[in-house]
């Protein structure tokens, strides 16, 4: 994933988290936040691996 597309994806995730919070849906916001953290960690790990091998 390119840096720009990753940033766009993160922006969409942030908006979805905010929308859930605004709607008062804490369970959905928490689930979205967990997914956001997981996808962020995947990107960071891939970046680290690419630096180590490349």
Image (tube, helix red, strand yellow):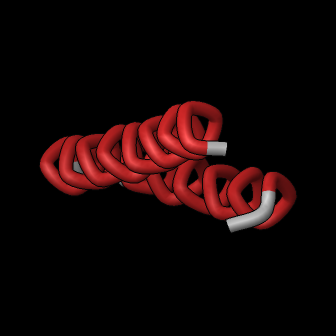
Q: Is residue 52 above or below residue 9?
A: above
Residue 53, quarter of picture: top right
Quadrant containing the C terminus is top right
48 versus 38 height, above or below: above
Question: Number of numbered discs present?
Answer: 0
- Image coordinates for residue 6, horizontal then vertical, percent: 69, 57
Which residue occupies 49% across, 40% down? 49
Give the quarter of the image for residue 26: top left
Residue 24 shows in the view? no
User: Residue at point 36% right, 38% down?
Assistant: 37
> Does residue 37 appear to the left or right of 31 in the view shown?
right
Left or right: 36 in relation to 18: left
Task: Name which residue lies at 55% across and 32% down.
Answer: 52
Residue 19 seen: yes
- Furthest residue in direction right, as rendered: 4
Q: Position of residue 20 (x, y in %)?
A: 38, 53
Residue 45 in the image: x percent, y percent?
43, 38
User: Horizontally, is 43 left or right of 35 in the view?
Assistant: right
In front here: 6 or 50? 50
Q: Residue furthest left?
A: 27
């Amino acid at each position: 994933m390119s840096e720009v597309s990753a940033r766009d994806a993160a922006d969409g995730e942030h908006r979805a988290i905010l929308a859930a919070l605004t709607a008062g849906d804490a369970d959905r916001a928490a689930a979205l936040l967990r997914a956001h953290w997981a996808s962020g960690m995947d990107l960071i790990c891939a970046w680290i691996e690419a630096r180590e091998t490349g």
